[in-house]
Amino acid sequence: MRRRLFALVLVGVPWLSFDARADDDSWSRPSQGIYGELDFTGMLEPFGAGNELQTSCQDLGAADCSRAQPIGGGFMGHVGTMRGRYGVELMIGALGDFQLPSAQYDGVTHQPFGNPLLANPPREETFIILRSGGMLAARGRYTIDGKRWRESVAAGIGLAYRYMALEREATSTSGLEDRPYFPTGTHYFSPALSLDASLQYRTTPTLAFAFGLGIWIENAGTGTRSAADDGRQLAGNGQVAPIATPAYAMASGPQVLFLPHVGLAFGP
């Protein structure tokens, strides 16, 4: 009988301890001190990056262009200090993304006074546009703590650096090819706006699983272009034909990046 009672006490103690922790004041007391978070993030740009095929398809002499949206991912993290519901933090991140647009040429100009030399020869051009870089932002944060769930929003301003490169492959309807065309890449710096909202599930008073959505807004300007090459040719079967190769815009104007993320949050 004593052994059974002792076993029941041993089994019951952890559950009593867990319940006690769930009711502990440390779960609901005002947050104060250093906090941080480390996230894996996806990246979507549903409005497009403003590449040449998206903004100037017919100016290129093409009959039709696919307007692929950039998609990618990376890592983000932040560290800051919290007092009550309010905090200030420094966020740093690294992202990479790609686009796969294409253009179809049928040898016919599709705008008034179009240049037939751009539309010929009939061909398909496929592109890979790559972008990578980092970002840094100072943000303010507002947090509501519960015993198990924590809601948090943040906003601030920052700086972005991006390096971009382009690769093009072209194949004419007669079988001539130019592959690949891979010019030197270029880069841009931009001021940025950072917004973030997250929901956290607290496993302890100082550790939580975080799920959220960030929005990062920057500007690629008008100078993010590949180098033009007037000497490119389609070749094959003992034949050659010149192919128009302008300075393609890889991105232009405002860039609105949506950043779904998941990670771990530390601290109060």
Image (cartoon, rainbow, N blue to C red):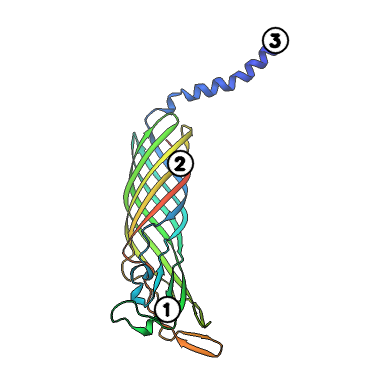
Looking at the image, the residue that sits furthest to the bottom is: 238
Q: Which residue is drawn at 40% across and 27% down?
A: 28
Q: Disc 1 residue type? A: Asp
N-term-proximal mark, 1 vs 3: 3
What secondary structure is marked by label 2? strand
Q: Which residue is drawn at 36% across and 37% down?
A: 143
In this view, the residue in front, 34 or 59, is: 59
**Could you classify mark 3 by the number of other residues whose Cα lies within 10 Å: few (under 14), some (14-19), or many (20 or more)?**
few
Looking at the image, the residue that sits furthest to the top is: 1
What secondary structure is marked by label 3? helix
* Horizontal and vertical percent position of residue 120: 41, 83
N-term-proximal mark, 1 vs 2: 1
Q: Disc 3 residue type? A: Arg
Q: Pointers 1 and 3 in contact (CB under 8 A)?
A: no
Q: Which mark is residue 210?
A: 2
Whole-number angstrom distance, CA of label 1 to CA of label 3: 92 Å
